[in-house]
């Protein structure tokens, strides 16, 4: 724990990149990985104007931009084994992939859903073979839709492999594949449930291996613990829940921590909201990032019986921070916010002054809803 605290004490801004449009929010961040797992040059961000921007990590210069009507939503993800392949969801009910080596706005692959689908979350399995996306609730349907990534040619569309349709009763806000087991996937929803599936099973009922209740709407979901046998989530009312799934079939409780409002729980700092979390395998454990509406970023370390304030990052953002990326192995920390700023933080750097806040008022990103009347006829996984 001491090396982490020592590193964080000197964490300061190295690079700052501003959006051309001051009213653009940075909603999601991902970084390309090499085969060895080290962070690479490319940083992808999702902006509130439904565009994906690709930056050079070292210089923070804009490399290129992706996106086409009706716009991108639900986040951005680099493939795990193909560092030049970038995925995003679209408001037209599809998931698209982009080749970062190719200039222009044309996608490489398109995975189409059913007519009424609006995808608001997605992820790619650790072996890059399966894509899963979560939908908004339409009628009585909140779906997890799956595609096989293989056998898709350039600019061709691919229909779903199958769906899970019975496990959630509201918007599927989060999808997270297991970091090392490609057959395991977790989903979080506005119905408060976090479900864990083994997609190798023949049907949805058999695939559902665990259900955890956060008692609120799930805003962030992640895997944690040794062998990533634990799951945790953050909620829209700033709650934090943490479960150990190894106890599902035992008499022991699976609940490690359940905090209804983190804003009232942590001493030594002021938290207005939670951003996300990450589990570090090198002994630093589960860490969370929160923030203040003035732009400060608060870093926390969680244990089952306590939450510890690690560091407050000052002087960076001037408005709410929406997204972050944290890689301790490469000492890489990125943040993006409503001030149209993308910041890179590293130890022992000269601090740069923050810019003025964005003119756009704080609000949730508006999503285009494409709800058609044609019914789907899904295949079950």
Image (cartoon, rainbow, N blue to C red):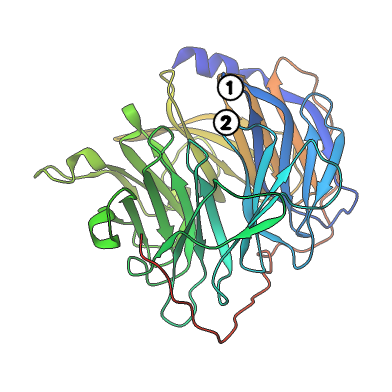
Which residue, as the protein is rendered here, is positioned at the far right?
Answer: 20
Q: Can residue 138 be seen in this view?
A: yes
Quick check: 327 left or right of 171? Answer: right
Crowdedness near tag 1: few (<14), some (14–19) or many (≥20) residues, C-alpha within 10 Å: few
Q: Residue at x 61, y 67 (%)?
A: 93
Query: Where is 358 relative to 70, above or below?
Result: above
Quick check: 42 left or right of 120? Answer: right
Q: State the quadrant of the C terminus.
A: bottom left
Q: How far apart are marks 2 and 1 (CA)?
A: 6 Å
Residue 139: x and y in percent read 46, 83
- Secondary structure of the residue carrying numbered label 2: loop
Residue 377: x and y in percent read 44, 76
Query: Where is 372 relative to 172, above or below?
Result: below
Q: Is residue 240 visible?
A: no
- Secondary structure of the residue carrying numbered label 1: loop
Quick check: 141 left or right of 158? Answer: left
Crowdedness near tag 2: few (<14), some (14–19) or many (≥20) residues, C-alpha within 10 Å: some
Q: Mark 1 points at which residue?
A: 35
Which residue, as the protein is rendered here, is positioned at the far left?
Answer: 251
Q: State the quadrant of the N terminus.
A: top left
Q: Mark 2 points at which residue?
A: 81
Residue 333: x and y in percent read 64, 29
Instruction: Quadrant for residue 29, please give it.
Output: top right
Q: Which mark is residue 181?
A: none
Give yes or no for contact between labels 2 and 1 (Cβ–Cβ under 8 Å).
Answer: yes
């Amino acid at each position: 724990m001491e090396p982490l605290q020592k590193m964080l004490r000197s964490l300061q801004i190295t690079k700052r990149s501003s959006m051309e449009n001051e009213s653009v929010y940075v909603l999601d961040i991902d970084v390309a990985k090499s085969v060895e797992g080290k962070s690479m040059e490319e940083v992808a961000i999702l902006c509130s104007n439904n565009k994906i921007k690709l930056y050079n990590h070292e210089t923070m210069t804009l490399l290129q931009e992706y996106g086409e009507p009706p716009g991108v939503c639900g986040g951005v993800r680099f493939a795990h084994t193909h560092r030049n392949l970038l995925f995003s969801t679209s408001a037209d009910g599809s998931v698209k992939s982009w080749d970062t080596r190719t200039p222009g706005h044309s996608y490489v692959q398109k995975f189409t859903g059913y007519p009424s689908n609006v995808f608001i979350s997605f992820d790619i399995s650790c072996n890059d073979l399966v894509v899963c996306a979560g939908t908004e609730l339409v009628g009585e349907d909140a779906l997890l839709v799956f595609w096989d990534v293989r056998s898709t040619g350039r600019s061709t569309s691919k229909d779903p492999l199958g769906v899970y349709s019975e496990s959630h009763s509201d918007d599927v806000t989060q999808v997270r594949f297991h970091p090392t087991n490609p057959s395991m996937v977790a989903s979080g929803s506005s119905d408060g449930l976090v479900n864990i599936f083994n997609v190798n099973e023949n049907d949805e009922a058999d695939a559902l291996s665990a259900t955890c209740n956060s008692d609120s709407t799930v805003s962030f979901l992640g895997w944690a613990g040794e062998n990533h046998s634990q799951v945790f989530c953050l909620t829209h009312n700033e709650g934090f829940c943490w479960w150990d799934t190894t106890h599902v079939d035992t008499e022991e409780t699976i609940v490690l921590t359940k905090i209804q409002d983190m804003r009232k729980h942590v001493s030594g700092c002021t938290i207005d909201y939670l951003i996300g979390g990450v589990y570090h395998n090198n002994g630093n454990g589960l860490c969370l990032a929160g923030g203040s509406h003035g732009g400060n970023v608060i870093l926390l370390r969680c244990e089952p019986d306590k939450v510890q304030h690690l560091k407050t990052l000052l002087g960076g953002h001037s408005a709410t921070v929406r997204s972050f990326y944290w890689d301790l192995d490469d000492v890489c920390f990125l943040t993006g916010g409503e001030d149209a700023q993308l910041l890179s933080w590293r130890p022992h750097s000269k601090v740069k002054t923050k810019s003025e806040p964005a003119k756009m008022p704080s609000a949730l990103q508006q999503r285009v809803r494409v709800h058609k009347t044609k019914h789907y006829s899904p295949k079950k996984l």
